[in-house]
Amino acid sequence: ILRPATGEFGTAPDSADARLWDNRGMSCTPPITGLVLAGGLGRRMGGVDKGLQLLDGQRLVDRVIGRLMPQVDALLVNANRNLDVYAELGHPLVVDRFEGFVGPLAGIHAGLTACTTPWLAVVPCDAPFLPLDLVVRLRAALESQAAHIAVARTADGLQPTFALMHRDALASLTDYLATGGRRLRDWYQTLPLAIIDFADAEAFTNLNSPAELAASSRV
């Protein structure tokens, strides 16, 4: 059973109002919704829809969903075009509420708006090798550091589109976007933030161009 968390954003993420309880009265891990960001313009990919591009015969979005789905309790897909194609995936679609393709923050805003679980895990649609332990490690960082957002980091730097956040971050993000904010990293800095290091930088590879897509092919 999924239920939304209650309470104010300032409530610690491991507080009782964000937990579920099983029928034995024992605390369980709060459910998590996954969000695949596939709503961008794909400029470096030549303007095509990145999520629908093929890697070894499989669409990028399918690969990402296949790796994220076992880590979460529900899944949303953020898309702004080819909605009929994305609808065939069988997961609820969320479209940007801010016009003009303002970047991943608009997709996260749409995901947080639709999210009915305490936590939202965010990943991009062009990362077909994302870690299979991504969510559990981000969740551990949130719990140990009493943060409201956890973000992955590798030797290449912060990976801002790989994150886990509390649903109540929606109010902060809405205000940030309404005042013209567009930078994901800058918004993160306004909230209690946990950063978790991952050794395998290649797992976070984004395939942003036809050349990068071809280089990652094993065929």
Image: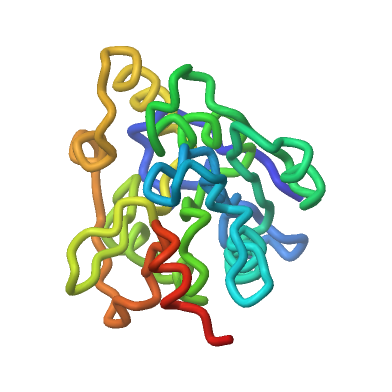
Q: Is residue 53 above or below residue 196?
A: above
| Residue 133 at least partly seen | no
Using the image as rendered, state which of residue 12 and residue 218 is in the foreground. Answer: 218
Location of residue 140 by image quarter: bottom left
Q: Is residue 154 above or below residue 61?
A: below
Furthest residue toward bottom: 218
Q: Residue drawn 75% across and 47% down? A: 91
Q: Is residue 83 above or below residue 153?
A: above
Q: Residue drawn 36% across and 27% down? A: 173
Q: Quadrant of the C terminus?
A: bottom right
Using the image as rendered, state which of residue 72 and residue 6 is in the foreground. Answer: 72
Q: Residue drawn 29% across and 59% down? A: 159
Using the image as rendered, state which of residue 54 and residue 174 is in the foreground. Answer: 54
Residue 205 rendering spot, x and y as whole percentages: 37, 69
Residue 98 rendering spot, x and y as whole percentages: 47, 19
Location of residue 115 by image quarter: top right
Left/right placement of residue 19 relative to residue 206 reads right
| Residue 136 at least partly seen | yes
Left/right placement of residue 190 relative to residue 98 reads left
Residue 64 rendering spot, x and y as whole percentages: 58, 64
Left/right placement of residue 162 relative to residue 1 reads left
Residue 208 rendering spot, x and y as whole percentages: 39, 57
Q: Residue drawn 77% across and 52% down? A: 89
Q: Is residue 4 above or below residue 152?
A: above
